Amino acid sequence: MLEYSMLYPRESVSRRAKRLDGIWKFQLDPAGKGKAAGWANGLPSPDWIPVPSSFSDLYTDKQTREYAGDFWYETQFVIPADWEGREIGVRFGCATHRASVYLNGRIAATHEGGFLPFCARITSLARYGEENRLAVCVNNELSETTLPCGRTVELAGGRKINKPYFDFFNYSGLQRPVYLTALPRESIFDFTLCPRLEGTDAEVDYEIVTTGEHPVEIEVRDASGALAASAKGKRGTLHIPHARLWRVRDAYLYQFTMRIAGENGVIDEYSEPAGIRTVEVRGEDILLNGEPVYLKGFGKHEDSDTVGRSFSPAVMKRDFELMKWVGANSFRTSHYPYSEEILQAADREGFLVVDEVAAVGMFESLMNFMEASTGKQTAFFEKPTTAALLENHLRALEELITRDKNHASVILWSLFNEPETTHAAAAPYFETVFRRAHELDAQKRPRTFALIMNSLPHTCQCYQFSDVVSLNRYYGWYVLGGNEIEEAEAAFRKELDAWKELGLRKPFLFTEYGTDTAPGIHKLPSAMWSEEYQLEYLKMNHRVFDSYPFVRGEQVWNFADFMTSEGILRMDGNKKGIFTRQRQPKAAAFYFKERWESLPSGFKGGNG
Ligand code: BDP
């Protein structure tokens, strides 16, 4: 079990959660001397910065934008006097990629991994009724033992630069909201919901973990506030007669409220909205509430102009509006766990989420998107560093599943993106990660990973672990592009025929396919990079998908154009968006709208 609670910071009769977001102090620490020099007691010559934000695109000089190393944040706040006696914490939505947190000059917490929340418990370091100084040393270096993978190299002049093994800009910093929290000494630490359907009723098995021994009760209210079920005890089953289910694009949420009851009233109360649904894979079907669904949607990024990877409620809203407009029903959180607020929105909107851990770049290459199709192999899981990587991977998985396990929207865990799978040494690594996901998830959701172009039926040593086989394929772009598109189609069909031959009886999902497309470039006849070629390519891909009944979903790469490292294959970032980075449609968006809105409701047995 994790040493801090992953529950979302919500206020209640017994809980306080105060946003610390705003303008903080900020200073780069290229020599890495801040810790020894006591910067935790006050930054020597700080700039100012908004929190949350990604620092890179705020600055005009290249060295800051591309900065790799330690960098510091500082802020001050008063902890109310009457909070004394409670458990006080500073809860970070994320710190990319690792952080050391100090309160009043003393270390309060460290955390590894840049896309999941953690809480620095500061009860004993806090000064009550006074100002407190919070300092955070963040580090954004990449390595082969931490997630996501890459390298950090030192140039001759001593400057460090990052070399990501992944195709998105290494935005970093305090990119999500930060809260000051106060909880009662005895509190609700975690809870797990596991729904089953019995005819028109729902049975929801639950478990509540608290930090004490007082009795616990739970109640469920429907959207009108009426009591739908209640139970006593730390574990049990809630019986909800005639339950209204959570469905694709027709979400219904109940409010689950847990209480620790004391001799003198409520000790702690925590409430969370949650949907009731089941999910399972049976044969080639992905079943939601027992009915097959066909996934229509996107691989996405948390990425937009100026704010980089920082959580922006406005961008989130726009993205959901666009996804609804285009007729999508799903997305993958490529290539890292997204902000919790995005999953909460998916719950409300009825979107299906493929929830991905930040296990990307486990293929040693600065251009894996190119090199994978050349058949390059990198024996990534046979290194002296593999054991340390696995440990970090398992820890990130535990944090992810603990954070996201109660979201109805999360239907599939994605445990890697495009790892090396062609060496036998990958298999034990995969087996451990896949097994752990099942152990951690009470709902036993299906698991998958996105297969890179060289992970083929006859070369991949790991597809057998997946409950859903997810393919990232670029026939007609990285392979046989442009004027060779007929050859691309033939090669694509040949690969799918080979998968069919294996007779896996599992659903297949396309988690990536796409072409870089410069918005506004029109060509008759089409040429690669034009809006016309994007359409031609998509139509070819869909023709192929539609002729294989085991293909149960299409998530095009990417929802929107996004920023990457600079390089000869990227012009102001990756241009595979169906929307531009400013969230306006390319021609392909109108084509998707037509296709997705007109796929018959029983498409491939589905109702999505
Ligand atoms: C795949 C990666 C993705 C890239 C994409 C591309 O999974 O992150 O952005 O291809 O090349 O290699 O556009």
Image: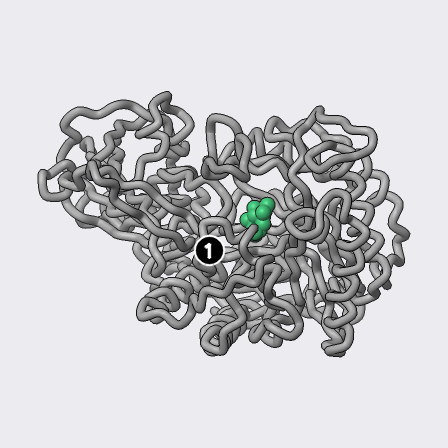
Q: Quadrant of the C terminus?
A: bottom right
Q: Quadrant of the N terminus?
A: bottom left
Q: Is residue 606 above or below residue 497?
A: above
Q: Position of residue 224 (x, y in %)?
A: 69, 45
Determine the residue positioned at 65% across, 62% down: 470
The tally of labels here is 1
Q: Nearer the viewer, residue 212 or 31?
A: 31
Determine the residue positioned at 48% across, 73% down: 426
Q: Position of residue 168 (x, y in %)?
A: 49, 42
On screen, residue 434 versus residue 75, left or right, reads right
Residue 9 is at least partly visible in this image? yes
Determine the residue positioned at 44% across, 64% down: 398
Q: Is residue 20 above or below residue 236?
A: above
Q: Residue 405 lies in what quarter of the image?
A: bottom right
Q: Give the amino acid at mark 1.
A: Gly
Q: Looking at this view, name the residue that lies furthest to the front.
A: 483
Q: In the rendered image, which residue does mark 1 sit on?
A: 361
Q: Nearer the viewer, residue 276 or 526?
A: 526
Q: Nearer the viewer, residue 595 or 104?
A: 595
Q: Nearer the viewer, residue 605 or 2?
A: 605
Q: Looking at this view, name the residue that lies furthest to the top.
A: 60
Label 1: few (<14), some (14–19) or many (≥20) C-alpha neighbours in 10 Å: many
Q: Residue 162 lies in what quarter of the image?
A: top left
Q: Position of residue 129 (x, y in %)?
A: 20, 34
Q: Is residue 493 above or below residue 517?
A: below
Q: Position of residue 61 (x, y in %)?
A: 34, 23
